[in-house]
Amino acid sequence: MSILVTGGAGYIGAHVVRLLLERGDEVIVVDDLSTGSAERVGDASLMQLDVAAADARDQLELVLRERGVTAVIHFAARKQVGESVEQPEWYYQQNVGGLANVLTAMRAADVRTMIFSSSAAVYGMPPDQVVTEDTVCRPINPYGQTKLVGEWLLSAAETAWGLNWAGLRYFNVAGAGRPELGDPAVLNLVPMVLDRLARGERPKIFGEDYPTPDGTCIRDYIHVLDLAHAHLAAMDHLTAEQAPIERIFNVGTGSGASVRQVIDAIGEVSGLDARAEVEERRPGDPPRLVADASRIGLVLGWQAQHGLQDIIASAWEAWQAGPRRIG
Ligand SMILES: NC(=O)c1ccc[n+]([C@@H]2O[C@H](COP(=O)([O-])OP(=O)(O)OC[C@H]3O[C@@H](n4cnc5c(N)ncnc54)[C@H](O)[C@@H]3O)[C@@H](O)[C@H]2O)c1
């Protein structure tokens, strides 16, 4: 297959690019390199382009046609919740406008298959602590809204011109499939803790009075390599003989770890003193957010292979291979 991967120079996209190359697919990465980097794409070809720019549609259509692309995996998006609250217009322009551009080009070039990076952020503060894909979606920030609107847009394109799509709602992604592919951003818990330790500071816990066994929030941590494999499973589902039976899938492990457990695991793996300091709760943090991952298991035959230890060990190895090695 010839697959176009937007955002393929980023953290998650690069893992998928490497797996696609390993299985012999031709891969074209389209990325503006705003948070990604060219060396992450390996032997894939790279086209530097902001997919949300006004002139992106024509360039995308051209590359889809010239390279005989059969499917698109769309990672390219802005993902900082706080920034999305401050600049909602820009987030909609980037995340929804970018997706609309890619879909317009696909429709023009008659490319009908897409996998979309959605997020557990679509659920907001759900009433259930274990969420199924049918749990009501009430995102509480513009970032989460753009992901939900993205799913709606894909569904509308399915109705209008037969788009064959899957939306993967990622839970808490962490770890690295290779030491050089670690998460370069300091936005999620594991890199945030490593960042604090690299500065010689104590990790922070925001609230330890939640109704959970150790009082800290519980999340579903998914190894980025497992997540990457979920994309291949979704692609196989979309391109199989039979019509796809589901479009939206939670990608998580189905079990949770608390903030304190994650920090303790980082201390154990690294041998560092990772005793945390406790601060006030942050607004908008549900006590427990764990995926019901049964649909993806049943329909795609996918399940996570790696637990928290593997996630932390690989994240630590990647951190130590990077520019801010500790010790
Ligand atoms: N990391 C997570 O925990 C997580 C969780 C849920 C969903 N997601 C989603 O997964 C996707 C990938 O996330 P990531 O963690 O790899 O982030 P990332 O920032 O590492 O990757 C995003 C990539 O897209 C590129 N990009 C961004 N905007 C672009 C644009 N307008 N045009 C072209 N390229 C653009 C960036 O340069 C980068 O290479 C995003 O859609 C994100 O919202 C991530």
Image (tube, grey):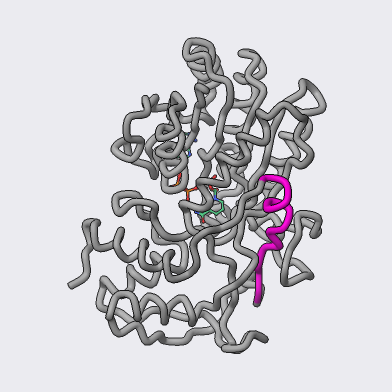
For residue 203, what is the image quadrant? Answer: bottom left
Against 174, residue 242 (above or below) is: above
Instruction: Say which residue appears at 30% left-offset and 54% top-offset.
Output: 179
Instruction: Say which residue appears at 79% left-offset and 59% top-offset.
Output: 135
Q: Which of 18 and 28 is in front in this view?
A: 18
Residue 45 x/y as whole percent: 37, 25
Residue 210 x/y as whole percent: 63, 85
Against 293, residue 53 (above or below) is: above
Left/right placement of residue 58 relative to residue 284 reads: left
Q: Which of 153 and 219 is in front in this view?
A: 219
Residue 36 x/y as whole percent: 38, 42
Tell me, yes or no, whether the highlighted magenta stretch contains residue 299.
Answer: yes
| Residue reaching furthest to the left | 327
Instruction: Say which residue appears at 62% left-offset and 88% top-offset.
Output: 213
Residue 217 visible in the picture:
yes
Against 15, residue 137 (above or below) is: below
Instruction: Say which residue appears at 33% left-offset and 68% top-offset.
Output: 195
Q: Quadrant of the C terminus?
A: bottom left
Highlighted range, magenta:
288-300
